[in-house]
């Protein structure tokens, strides 16, 4: 089924994640709170998306967004 909500705009406070992005992947990450993740439309599938993002009043940058569970780390809650 096609996702009716794309493009999708979301906003929320950046919260502390698992601490793996910069350390293990070498890529800085920004994480949404559980409340923001739970507010996503139910028809947005887990997966990898691309788009534009800014943190605070900073510059807008190209970004990659992961929605889902990371089986490598055995995550039990969906994260973004």
Image (cartoon, rainbow, N blue to C red):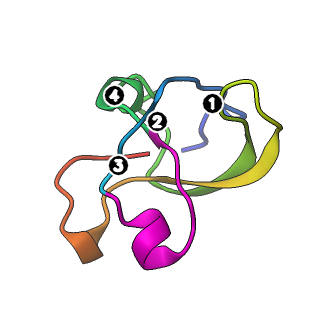
Disc sitting over residue 43 in the figure:
2
Q: Nearer the viewer, mark 1 or mark 4?
A: 4
- Crowding at dot 2, Cα within 10 Å, few <14 / some 14-19 / many 20+, comes out as few
State how far apart marks 1 and 3 are (Cα).
29 Å
**Cβ–Cβ below 8 Å for labels 1 and 4?**
no
Report the residue marked by disc 3: 17
The residue labelled by disc 4 is 38
Ranked by sequence position, the earlier of labels 2 and 1 is 1
Q: Which residue is mark 1?
A: 4
Q: CA distance from mark 3 to mark 4?
A: 16 Å
Indicate the secondary structure of the residue bearing disc 2.
Answer: loop
> What span is colored magenta in the figure?
19-31
4 lies left or right of 53: left
- Quick check: marks 2 and 1 in contact, CB under 8 Å? yes
**Which mark sits nearer the N-terminus, 2 or 4?**
4
Q: Earlier in the sequence, mark 1 or mark 3?
A: 1
Is-magenta flag for residue 58? Answer: no
Q: Position of residue 67 (x, y in %)?
A: 45, 50
Which residue is at the front of the view, 25 or 45?
25
Query: Residue 49: x percent and y percent?
Result: 63, 54
């Amino acid at each position: 089924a096609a996702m009716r909500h794309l493009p999708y705009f979301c906003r929320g406070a950046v919260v502390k994640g698992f601490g793996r992005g910069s350390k293990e992947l070498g890529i800085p990450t920004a994480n949404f709170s559980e409340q923001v993740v739970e507010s996503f439309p139910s028809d947005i599938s887990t997966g990898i998306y691309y788009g534009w993002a800014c943190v605070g009043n900073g510059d807008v940058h190209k970004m990659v967004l992961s929605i889902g569970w990371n089986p490598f780390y055995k995550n039990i809650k969906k994260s973004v």
